[in-house]
Amino acid sequence: MGAAAEAADPHIIQFTPQGTVKEVRQVSARFSEPMVPLGDPRKVAEPFEIACPEPGIGRWVDSRNWVYDFTRDLPAGVRCTFRIKPGLTTLAEKLIVGQQEFAFSTGGPAIRSSEPDEGNLGIDEEQAFVLFLDAEATEPSLLEHVSFSIEGIPERVGVRLLTGKEREQILKARYRQRVSDPVVILQASQRFPNGAKVNLVWGKGVASQSGVPTEQDQVLSFKTRDPFTANFSCEREHRQAGCIPVTSMTLRFSAPVVWEQAGQVVLVGPGGRRWKPEGEKAPSESVWMVVFKGPFPEESAFQVEIPEALRDDVGRRLLNASSFPLLANTDPFPPLAKFSARFGIVEWKADPALPVTLRNLEPEVPGRLLQVDKEQHDETPGKDQEAQEGVKGKTWRIPPEQSGEILQWLRKVAVANRETSVFSPGGRSGSGNIRSACGRPASQPGNAIPTANSSIA
């Protein structure tokens, strides 16, 4: 029979689904010629002999299209075959020719989701994986076809299935309600190395209880957490220098530690003096570091001591515990020049003094006083002239009856910054009698000096 003649014979134009398809709910077949009278589908109720473990109902949508509706979305592991009934003819009494059998499968068991989630970068070295499946899998096929590929290990690593009481304890601890989906809990047959990439390979051949196997690998990627370590740090002028004694010292953990243990870390200095970590927390609260607040004695030796029972949140011992007690040294105090206190109001024309703290500078430190006023200083040469031109001020006189406004100006100067004048539009908190040049916040070196009835530089 020629191709043209064959195409002219009655046959099935389209049948779906075929092959491996997940979550099938309906089967459909389209015939090349009318099979039943339009509006009267009673002539041919079922055009197929159906071999399928899942129940469903067939019906004619119109004279050429037939569908079969399952009562639910088919789970994995289902294989169905639809074979044209012997002698099936069209409405015109022509025999259906061509392909007589159509089949599909929902495939072998697949992983719907996992705990921990795919992509987790901090799994435990002995992580148990809870896998939610779309169908029950046979234990022999799991042990044969599921494995781990681990960075740094050339061979695949097999799995161990967790069953019985061990399995129930994990499910009860992680999930309040009973789990309805098929679940597999497994571990690698050997411990993972720290900081390694790990792939869980749900391999080709994992079979459902009905015998339907998976046809390709399903791979979930993870990474193990870094080893539990503690690292000391402090501010230094350069890498080879000791700690700056006026700043804090810090011990950082690579994993969380409960405060009950972290709070027992101590810093021991000269004469056996002991520093405890800054802050107080609940014993069960987890922290990632402890901080020892300075200042500390200069040019001194210190050691960081940790409790012997120190563990992280999963009970791991410190990998670098042999490095403790850890030694640290402080350098001399760094050079310093600053006003020793926050500024306040000083009386105008009262010859006031502002103390300045000097440390580790030259034996003799030259200085000069710059006056804030409106006069020009043409006779002042070079850098002094430039410095005086940079000192700008403004006078605001506070009458005696408005002396209460001094407090408002003190508050404004306390939060003043270098970019905005306290006399700028919208920045005045009231009228007053202050001559001021705004500078750094009062606690920093080189601050402007807020005064009442005085000049400030």
Image (cartoon, rainbow, N blue to C red):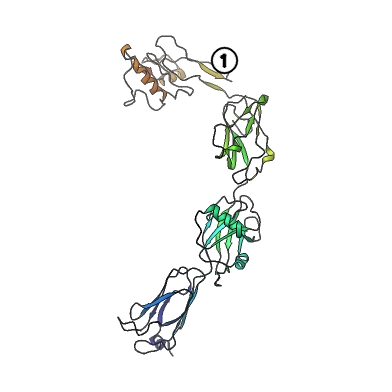
Residue 324 visible somewhere in the drawing: yes
Residue 395 visible somewhere in the drawing: no
Q: Quadrant of the N terminus?
A: bottom left
Return the x and y of residue 401 as percentages of the image width and height: 31, 12
Residue at x 34% of width, y 89% of height: 92
Q: Is 33 positioned to the left or the right of 210 in the image?
A: left
Above-or-below relation of 97 to 202: below
Q: Secondary structure at mark 1?
A: loop
Residue at x 35% of width, y 85% of height: 43
The answer to which of 107 and 44 lies nearer the viewer is: 44
Above-or-below relation of 396 to 157: above
Q: Is 412 positioned to the left or the right of 178 in the image?
A: left
Residue beneath disc 1: 364
Q: Quadrant of residue 34?
A: bottom left
Above-or-below relation of 389 to 81: above
Return the x and y of residue 266 as percentages of the image width and height: 63, 32
Identity, as a three-letter code, of the amino acid under mark 1: Glu
Q: Residues within 10 Å of mark 1 (few under 14, many from 20)?
A: few
